[in-house]
Image: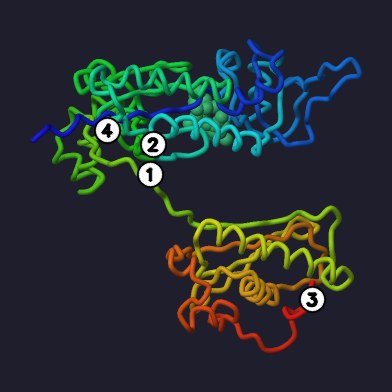
Amino acid sequence: MPLAPRRLIAHLDMDAFYASVELLRYPELRGQAVVIGGGRDRQPALQPDGTHHYASLRDYAGRGVVTTCTYEARAFGVHSAMGLMKAARLAPEAVLLPVDFDEYRLYSRRFKDAVRGLAPQVEDRGIDEIYIDLSEVPGAQHDAGAAAARALKDAVFEATGLRCSIAVAPNKLLAKIGSELDKPDGLTLLTHADLTTRIWPLAARKVNGIGPKAAEKLAGFGLHTIGDVAAADPQWLLANFGLSYGAWLHAAAHGRDERAIVTHSEPKSISRETTFERDLHAVHDRSTLSALFTRLCERLAGDLQRKGYAAQTLGIKLRFDDFKRVSRDVTLPAPIADGQAIRHAAGSCLKRVDLSQRLRLIGVRATGLVPTSDAASAEPQAPPGTRAAATRPALMTHKWQGELPFFDPSTKT
Ligand code: TTP
Ligand code: MG
Ligand code: MG
């Protein structure tokens, strides 16, 4: 029987991700200290001569924080989550750019697609990082994944113009630590033999799973590095950190981690929201609101159906003209995915809110998602009962009697 291939797990993390995406748009800022933070109203002004006028960090006043920054800004000590005012003292000359999540999401999708094109076993870990199982990628076993990692970096650059750092290791834990070791533009190969030299000297906090609290507690016992934790008596760890976390600490510090790559994850919620161009009132703008709300529900239904889910719980979110937020939800006897049913359920939530104030924003959210079976979604005649429940849910937490505040669900909009 052939031997099982050695596990080769890569962790890929984009370099200064948001800042690097901004540099694609403003290439003249390359090489400069650039800090990302603050709202959309701080877009660089386009001058008549076609150049941009950038906001300088020194002029910033407010309570915003640094989202991320270029490596040039990091050289001054600036880092993510630092107050912008403090950052301005460290790097007054830095350029301040606002965040643009839509753009980052677009590039996130692009780099992930580029990776999947070469290595399909990908686990999504957020906007700028992924794990990739390279164990079965052709040739990877011959050079510990070096050529595959190189090819991934090139593919990401070709698809996005962005650099990333990759580490290939025997497991996720070591790969995650490794991708930071040679940032930016790093390519790091780690084996268990590197544990003592490259991993043990690092701060315990570098282990994904040792958060600030655990790190503080460890430090209280004089355990600062991963090596310190590795050297600690395992029984002592169990006694002080609990059976499960203590055992995990011991294994992690020794570089042991058997977790598989999870290529498919179920979304926790799907939502849609809209901010109005002008604040709307439930009575005075009844028909406009009703139409917008129906449309929102239909779009949510479209999202659910496209992704193959039905929702057990439906919720609404409102923001009023004074920015106060309110949310309500309702749990249904059977999951729904149909626009009309969603509209009914969302309408019932709305009825439970005092709507005397003007609204800025309205949102609908589906949670308790259950995958609709292929058969049910392909077959228009779903089993009896399912469909009836789907179009007219009997609500568990709220009854339908009485008048709805500003729209009648039967009104066509
Ligand atoms: P990171 O990967 O932690 O940081 P980075 O990509 O900016 O820099 P590098 O990996 O080269 O060290 O985070 C990815 C993005 O997530 C980052 O560009 C901005 C965002 N982010 C926040 O919004 N808040 C934070 O506190 C951090 C750390 C990141
Ligand atoms: Mg990153
Ligand atoms: Mg990251």
Picture layout, residue 234 above or below residue 275: above
Picture layout, residue 289 above or below residue 228: below
Is 384 left or right of 302, judged from the image as shown? left
Give the image's coloring scheme. Answer: rainbow
Residue kind at label 3, given as amino acid type = Phe
- Asked whether 53 or 230 is in front, the reply is 53
Picture layout, residue 233 above or below residue 78: below
Mark 1 or mark 4, which is nearer to you?
1
Structural distance between the alpha carbons of marks 3 and 4: 61 Å
Badges 3 and 1: C-beta atoms under 8 Å apart?
Answer: no
Label for residue 263?
A: 1
Residue appearing at x 42%, y 28% in the figure: 12
Label for residue 406?
A: 3
Residue appearing at x 35%, y 22% in the figure: 148
Q: Which mark is first along the chain, 4 or 1?
A: 4
Structural distance between the alpha carbons of marks 1 and 4: 38 Å
Residue kind at label 4, given as amino acid type = Phe
Q: Quadrant of residue 279?
A: bottom right
Q: Which mark is first along the chain, 4 or 2?
A: 2
Label for residue 221?
A: 4
Q: Quadrant of residue 253?
A: top left
Residue most extreme to the bottom: 401
Label for residue 373?
A: none
- Asked whether 362 or 208 is in front, the reply is 362
Q: Which mark is first along the chain, 4 or 3?
A: 4
Q: Position of residue 106 (x, y in %)?
A: 61, 36
Q: Position of residue 232 (x, y in %)?
A: 18, 31
Label for residue 120?
A: 2
